[in-house]
Amino acid sequence: MDLRVLAVMALLTVAMYTHTSYAKPISLVERCWCRTTVNTVPQRSIRELKFLNTPNCSFQVIARLKNNREVCINPETKWLQQYLKNALNKIRSKKQAN
C-alpha cells in the first residue's frame, strides 16, 4: 500500500511540474483561412470585406455577407480588382491633398 501511494505522489509531482503550452499547434498556425474561393458573390449582399496577407498564404479576401456567413472571394475577380484600384486611388488623392 505504501508503495502505491508513493508512486501516485511521484506521478502527481511530475505532472505538476511539466510545462504546458497554450499556443496553437503549428498545423493550425500555418493553415490558410481560405481553402477555396468563389468568383461570384452579389456585391449587394456583402456587409464587410477583410483582406489577409500572411507569409504562408497568398493574398486572401474574406467577405462577410449580410446573413453573417463568411466566404472567400477570388482576389482575381474583376470587380474586386476595380474596387481595390479605386480604394488605392482614393487614399493617394487624400495624401496629396494634405
Image (cartoon, rainbow, N blue to C red):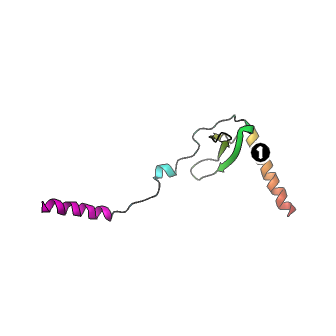
Can you say whether 35 is above or below 10 in the image?
Answer: above
Please tell me which residue is depicted at 75% across the width and 38% down the height of the picture: 44
Q: Is residue 93 visible?
A: yes
Residue 52 relative to residue 78: left or right:
left
Residue 19 relative to residue 27: left or right:
left
Given the current orientation, which residue lies at the most extreme right position?
A: 97
Does residue 8 show up magenta in the picture?
Answer: yes
Q: Quadrant of the N terminus?
A: bottom left
Q: Is residue 77 visible?
A: no
Does residue 71 show up magenta in the picture?
Answer: no
Q: What element carries label 1?
A: helix
Please tell me which residue is depicted at 69% across the width and 46% down the height of the picture: 49
What residue is shown with label 1? Answer: 83
Please tell me which residue is depicted at 65% across the width and 36% down the height of the picture: 38
Q: What residue type is labelled 1?
A: Tyr
Q: Where is residue 62 in the image (x, y as percent from the top left)?
A: 65, 44
Q: Position of residue 8 (x, y in %)?
A: 21, 60
Residue 30 relative to residue 77: left or right:
left
Q: Position of residue 71 (x, y in %)?
A: 63, 40
The magenta region covers 1-16
| Quadrant hosting residue 65 | top right
Q: Residues within 10 Å of mark 1 (few under 14, many from 20)?
A: few
Can you say whether 37 is above or below 56 in the image?
Answer: above
